[in-house]
Amino acid sequence: MKTALLAAAGLSAIAHAANAQSNDATQVDEIVVTGTRSAGRSALAASTPIDVVSAEAMEATGYTDLNRALNQLQPSVNFARAATTATAANTRPITLRGLAPDQVLVLVNGKRRHANSVLNVNNSIGRGSAGVDLDAIPESAIARIEILRDGAAAQYGSDAIAGVVNIILKSNAGGGAAFASAGVTGEGDGETWATGGHVGFAIGDGGHLTLSAEARGQAATNRAHVDQRFGRVTYRIGDPKSSAQSAAFDAALPLGGVEIYGFGTLTHKVSNNAAGFRVPGFSAAWPNGFLPIIEPTIWDGALTAGLRGAWAGFDLDLSQTYGRNGADFDVHDTANASLGATSPTRFDSGGVKYEQWVTDATASRPLTLMAGGNLAVGGQLRHETYAIRNGEPDAYFGLGADGFAGFNPRNPTDARRDAQAAFVDMELRPVASVFLGLAARYDHYDGFGGDTTYRATARWDVTESLAVRASAGTGFKAPSLQQQYFSAVQGATSAGQLVTVGTLPVSDPVAKALGAEDLKPERSRNLSAGVVVGPWRGFSATADYFDIRIDDRIALSEQLSGAAVVAVLRAAGITNFQQARFFTNAVDTTTKGFEIMARWRGDLDDRTALSLNLGYGRFDSTLDRLRANPVLPTLPLLNTKSILFLTEAQPKDKITGQAVLSRGPLSVQLSTAVFGDYVSAPLVAPQTFDGRYTVDVSAAYEVRPGLTLEGGVQNLSDVRPQELEWPAASLAATGGSFPTGEETPLGVNGRSFFIRASARF
């Protein structure tokens, strides 16, 4: 309620500023390419909610990674900053409207982006998903990001249940920019640095080649409490030590009546993550205990080549996209207790690889019926592969290397599948003030058959500054290859205790003996309705209600344990893990809420400009149905912790606000994000956490034309997440080392400082 009141107060302030404006500055409304195949449509004129985040807005936050910038700027975005998990802390997927990362479709220049090979199997937001790693796209290559907050599976295909994120790359044919930045936390750790830039070249007659590159690094942070068992800090809880190097290009060359185009990205990342502390006695190789370090090396690349032109009144677009994400895991400062005192302390734990080939063909033409419209038809062919590389034998022998025993699937994993799709997308204006849209798509996946989805949209411009809009649609999301075939053994916590867990594919006979069944696709239904106000003297606002129903939702099961589980594992000759889990279609959920966005931009005098942005989102997810374990009914497929990750572990509401005041060469920005309460069970019992808030302040000064210096403070008030309530059993297991859970959108670092120098040429 308090966040809703703050949002209402902010909207009132923006409206007052609009009324007080002394000139007729007009709203600058961005032209978008997401959510429509009609040319020249603006975000404010769309039939569904679309937000546009500019490169300048992201740069002004001072964050060196895209996810934190979006988390600060967008109320519908949530980025939980995992502090200990090697899978969640090294890939950077986001969520929309409180749903999972793999229920957001990510596009680059309108083309489907490939997913992570690394599956999040840890107790953190996005558990059980392999979303798209936004951290693999250099921020210096991005011109803007368009966020469609509506289900759009019928337009773009599987995964677009919560919405679509379309990243538009820079495409300038001249000039460029470069930057360098550095930062540090208020506690003196977590030093960050980044440098990069882009440059454009004209090629041919009207063509361009834009090159971008970026490098960045971060030292680890640690907010672990003193381990009460030993009187010292034994854990490392915070951001991992990491480094990344990225490059991107965007090119187009007109040749006669056609244009050849291409774009791509390449990223190399290494990060250093601590697992749970192993007390003395775990291994003879470490008599004083040890803290295993998991170090994944990730290569991520994507390349698109295409041809577009006009023929017989149609605009044609044919493209081929290839994407690859691979991760190799090294574990060190550890031991395999089964090897005794002679155990190595460093292991190659294997790796995973995901590849995707996508062929797209689209034909589009304007319609002259009634007051106009557009018709588009097209198809898509997609081929995917997923493979697991075994680690060295010492890594998975017996109990395995502590921290991560490595990949050793019971069956070799080298999976592949094909998917085909065809769609039709029509937009029509019966009269000038009414806009209707209808899209239908048929998807067919190997092993799952086919399904048809639809999407209908409508908008009525009541006046020049008032419109109403609505949409309805269905979605179809096939299980990912990662969810079908992932297999690994690793350490995890259960009721506050450290255990070894095996994650099994649903096809494994042991998983079936524990209740696994063949996975089915998720099916969803989306409804939304809203109003649009403006543009009016620099002011605009939108308010949208949404309702998303998901049946047969795919989730990672509970860590199943107990006598019945032990009996199944022993019968199969398994001794290297005590608990097991697998993927399941065990739940149906409903997510509903509303979002309000308002902004005002105008001149206060000849030299002074002011921009105000305010957003509020409310997100309520509920469990509609939980299916029983078909084999062991006394063992639920999902327990409280896993259910909360799907329903209440993300903030129930969120406010974002930015105020930018510019006068001459000086610009000052105030930014805030207020997170609502969330409920999770990081230890044993559920706990309600205050979401809390963060306020960022920065100032930029153009010391000479094209050269700007900027500095700022992030989390000015040094707000920290609410701490855990430690039960005695968990306190004994970890010594009270954890300050909070992995779900916090605020992060654990507290206040930080940054400086940045940028030059445009």
Image (tube, rainbow, N blue to C red):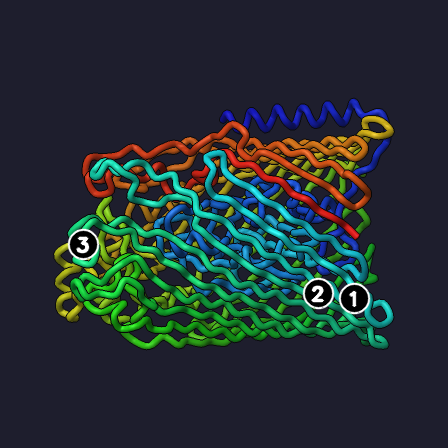
Q: Which residue is mark 1?
A: 208
Q: Nearer the viewer, residue 218 or 258?
A: 218
Q: Which residue is mark 3?
A: 282
Q: Nearer the viewer, residue 181 or 310?
A: 181
Q: Earlier in the sequence, mark 1 or mark 3?
A: 1
Q: Mark 2 and mark 1 in contact (Cβ < 8 Å)?
A: yes
Residue found at x 62% / y 63%:
247
Q: Which residue is mark 2?
A: 250
Other-residue count near label 3 (Cα within 10 Å), few / some / many at <14 / 14–19 / ≥20: some
In space, the residues marked 3 and 2 are separated at their CA atoms by 52 Å
Residue 320, horizontal then vertical, whole percent: 63, 74
Q: Is residue 36 above or below residue 7?
A: below
In space, the residues marked 1 and 3 are separated at their CA atoms by 60 Å
Other-residue count near label 1 (Cα within 10 Å), few / some / many at <14 / 14–19 / ≥20: many
Residue found at x 59% / y 58%:
137
Q: Earlier in the sequence, mark 1 or mark 2?
A: 1
Tag 2, which secondary structure? strand
Tag 1, which secondary structure? strand
Q: Earlier in the sequence, mark 3 or mark 2?
A: 2
Q: Quick check: 420 left or right of 461? A: left
In space, the residues marked 1 and 2 are separated at their CA atoms by 8 Å
Residue 697 in sight from this viewpoint: yes
**Residue type indicated by callout 1:** His
**Residue type indicated by callout 3:** Phe
